[in-house]
Each structure stands twice: as C-alpha cells, then as structure tokens.
Amino acid sequence: MLYLSCLRGKTSKRLTAKEYKDATVTRVDPDGVVVKTKSGITKVYFIELPKEVQELFSYDSEKATSYSAEQATNYTAYQKQQDETQRQQQAAEAKSKSALTEQQAATNRTQAFANPPSASFRNREMTCFAKIGQCEATRAGSIPAG
C-alpha cells in the first residue's frame, strides 16, 4: 500500500493496492502523481486511485484528458524530431564516408604518379617489347612479298 505524506498536512493516505515502501511524491500532474521509491520512479494515475485521493489533489478529469492529449502530441513531435535528427546524422555520415573514399582514391592516384615503376619492372617491360618486336620482324619476313 502506498502511503503519502500530503503537502497539505501530516496525514497519510493509502493510494493504491500496490505496495510502495518509503515512497515520495515528486510531482503532481493533472492526470496523476509521480512517485519515487528505492526501486525507481513511477506514475500513479488518478483514475487508479480512490475518490478521496483524487479530491485531495483536486483531480479534474477534463484537465487530465487534455493534459494527456497534450503530452501525447508533444511525445509524437519529439519522436519525429529524433527521427529527423537521426536521418540527418546518417546522411552526414554517408557523405563523410563518401568524401573520405574519394580523398583516398585521389591520394592513391597521386601516389601512382609520384612513384614511377621500378627499374626491374622497366627492364621486364623492355624485354617484352623487344620480344614483340622480334616476333613482328620474323612474321614480316615470313609473309611473301606480293
């Protein structure tokens, strides 16, 4: 059973059948009270409480309904904002990754021009060209002149 030391006096009131030990009301909203215990924070809605407790906190069902609707609207707007922020972060990360990839490709191209082929590669290349030349000469000599 939740017992609450009221701000209006030192009397304690049983709020619900659920037991909350050493509970402190931290906030009173139009639709309920927020209670802090050793195990955490929870909200107890006035519609779950006896009439006498509702009256103690000046509960008004119309104000509670309006407040709950406003909270739901605010939460929806907050979620949309969070989704948009996440989408923007993902887009920025993709753009950054793309720019980094492009920068790495440019660096690789620059390094390819800055580091010409090695001498051994050039020697092998020259040997290949020489062999190609010999083959073409041999082939040209074997074709009858016409």
Image (cartoon, grey):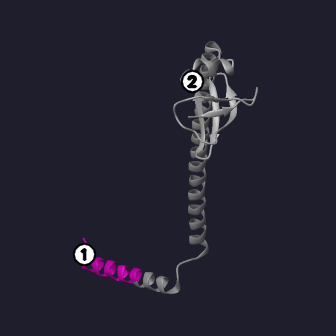
Q: Position of residue 108 (x, y in %)?
A: 56, 67
Image quadrant assignment for residue 139: bottom left
Q: Secondary structure at mark 2?
A: loop
Residue beneath the point at 30% across and 77% down: 140
Is residue 143 one of those drawn in magenta? yes
- Quarter in which the N terminus is drawn: top right
Left or right: 7 with respect to 103?
right
Left or right: 131 with respect to 39?
left
Residue beneath the point at 39% across and 81% down: 128
Residue type at mark 2? Answer: Leu
Callout 1 touching callout 2 (CB < 8 Å): no
Which residue matches tag 1? 143
- Quarter in which the C terminus is drawn: bottom left
97 vs 121: above or below = above
Q: Badge 2, how many Cα within 10 Å: few under 14, some, many 20+?
A: some
Q: Which residues are magenta?
A: 128-146
26 vs 32: above or below = below
Q: Main secondary structure of the magenta part?
A: helix
Q: Residue furthest top?
A: 62
Q: Which mark is residue 49?
A: 2
Q: Position of residue 22 (x, y in %)?
A: 64, 42
Q: Position of residue 38 (x, y in %)?
A: 61, 47
Q: Position of residue 121 (x, y in %)?
A: 47, 83
